[in-house]
């Protein structure tokens, strides 16, 4: 439970950094967060992936963005997981 709150807090921090056009700082928050994506709640994990993908595409890091697309595709391909996305 404590880790779930910490991960959600870090995601919010990254979102605020993106809003302030501090993409490098946001990446510094998101990339270590992504390393611990497996035990995260699914809705937080998907948001981390989407934000990372957006930042990689904005910075022309297409290979890294493609890896996030692949992970999202695997997650979203399972229709039983879809109802959990919006929790």
Image (cartoon, grey):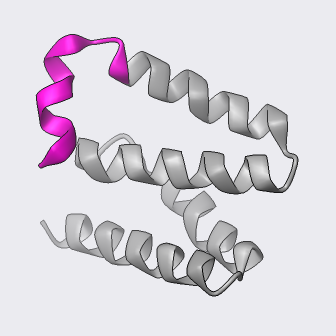
* Magenta segment main secondary structure: helix
Judge by depth and name the residue closer to the eye, 21 or 65: 21
Query: Residue 64 occupies which quadrant of the picture?
Result: top right
Q: Please report the bounds of the magenta region as a residue range.
A: 76-87
39 with respect to 35 (left or right): left
21 in relation to 53, above or below: below
35 with respect to 28 (left or right): left
Residue 72 at what x, y percent from top left? 47, 28
Residue 31 at what x, y percent from top left? 62, 59
At horizontal 52% and vertical 74% (from top left) the residue drawn is 14
Quarter of the picture containing the N terminus is bottom left
- Residue 35 visible in the displayed image: no
Asked whether residue 26 is drawn in magenta, I would say: no
Tell which residue pokes out farthest to the bottom in this image: 20
- Residue 32 visible in the displayed image: yes
At horizontal 43% and vertical 17% (from top left) the residue drawn is 74
Tell which residue pokes out farthest to the right in this image: 60
39 in relation to 82, above or below: below
Residue 67 at what x, y percent from top left? 66, 30
Residue 8 at what x, y percent from top left? 30, 69
At horizontal 67% and vertical 67% (from top left) the residue drawn is 27
């Amino acid at each position: 439970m404590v880790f779930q709150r910490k991960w959600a807090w870090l995601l919010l921090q990254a979102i605020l950094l993106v809003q302030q056009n501090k993409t490098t700082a946001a990446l510094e928050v998101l990339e270590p967060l992504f390393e611990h994506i497996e035990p995260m709640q699914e809705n937080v994990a998907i948001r981390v992936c989407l934000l990372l993908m957006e930042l990689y595409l904005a910075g022309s890091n297409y290979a890294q963005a493609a890896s996030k697309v692949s992970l999202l595709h695997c997650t979203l391909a399972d229709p039983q997981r879809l109802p959990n996305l919006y929790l």
